[in-house]
Amino acid sequence: MNASTTMTIRVPAALKEKLDRLADGTRRSRSYLAAEAVSAYVERELAIIEGVQRGLADVEAGRVTPHDEAMDQVDALIAGARNRKA
């Protein structure tokens, strides 16, 4: 079982009321729902940060495509798709 710890946060009263309604409607505790929400937020934000860091590493290593070249490739793909559709 994962170890857990206690955190105290401040939320607007309206948000607490919504969390109470959600807890009642799902038969889950406020604590469980709040932990799930924080977990999902942290995972999403870390994925964004890690993606940016990978992109910066690619730039530093020269693994990039100039904008004009990328746009030429996109335009060619669009033109090819249109030709196949016609």
Image: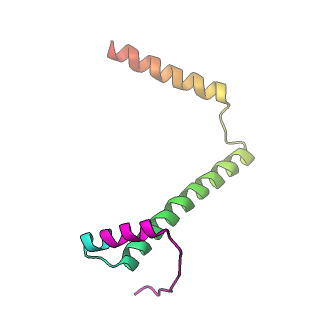
81 lies above or below 37: above
Q: Residue at x 50, y 59 (%)?
A: 44
Say whether residue 28 is left or right of residue 80: left
Residue placed farthest to the right in the image? 60
Which quadrant would the C terminus be assigned to in this image? top left
| Residue 42, percent from left and from top | 52, 66
59 lies above or below 33: above
Q: Residue at x 27, y 73 (%)?
A: 24
| Residue 37, percent from left and from top | 43, 67
Which quadrant would the N terminus be assigned to in this image? bottom left
Q: Residue at x 46, y 21 (%)?
A: 78
58 or 7: nearer the viewer: 7
Residue 50: in magenta span: no
Q: Residues in magenta?
A: 1-21
Residue placed farthest to the front in the image? 13
Q: How many marks?
A: 0
To which quarter of the image does residue 25 belong? bottom left
| Residue 17, percent from left and from top | 38, 70
Say whether residue 42 is left or right of residue 62: left
46 lies above or below 65: below
57 lies above or below 40: above
